[in-house]
Image (tube, rainbow, N blue to C red):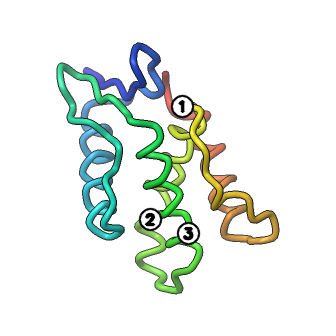
Amino acid sequence: MSQFFQIGERVLWNPATGVAQVFLRAAESFAALTDLPTGLGPMDADECEIDIDVFSAFVDTLIDRYTRSNHVILRSLMQGFTATAIVLVTRGGGHLPALQSSDNPDIASLKELSRHHDRAMVT
């Protein structure tokens, strides 16, 4: 069984149910960390509607927090989720100004991991 992360009828990602549940729970944890809404709706009938503007702002804040943090464990916990979220924002046509820093090696690392995730994320 799988779940659908989508904008309207446009499916951005179709992960297995367990993966979708972990992703949504991680989003809730990071929402508490940032004091921002995620932009991810509830999983209803195997579908999660994404408000791309709200989700983009949430992910952009996570990217900024990730690059400013020097806490090794927090960065490690954030990295995989953030890379996956970058793929969803990109597929959904959102904007991530925090990714524009071309000389930051942390940004380069997130971009590379998100490209790797993109290839693995079924639509």
In which quarter of the view is residue 8 placed? top left
Q: Residue 78 got which mark?
A: 2
> Residue beneath label 3, please?
64
Marks 2,3: beta carbons within 8 A? no
Q: Earlier in the sequence, mark 2 or mark 1?
A: 2
> Residue beneath label 1, please?
92
Tell whether 27 sits left or right of 117: left
The amino acid beneath tag 3 is Asp
Instruction: Kindly report which numbered mark, 2 or 1, lies closer to the viewer in this rendering.
Output: 1
- Other-residue count near label 2 (Cα within 10 Å), few / some / many at <14 / 14–19 / ≥20: some
In the displayed orientation, state which residue is furthest to the bottom. Answer: 70
Name the spot of residue 9 as percent of width and height, x first.
41, 13
- Determine whether the residue tagged by mark 3 lies in a helix, strand or loop: helix
Instruction: Kindly report which numbered mark, 2 or 3, lies closer to the viewer in this rendering.
Output: 3
What separation in Å lies between label 3 and label 1 (alpha carbons)?
20 Å
Name the spot of residue 68 as percent of width and height, x first.
56, 79
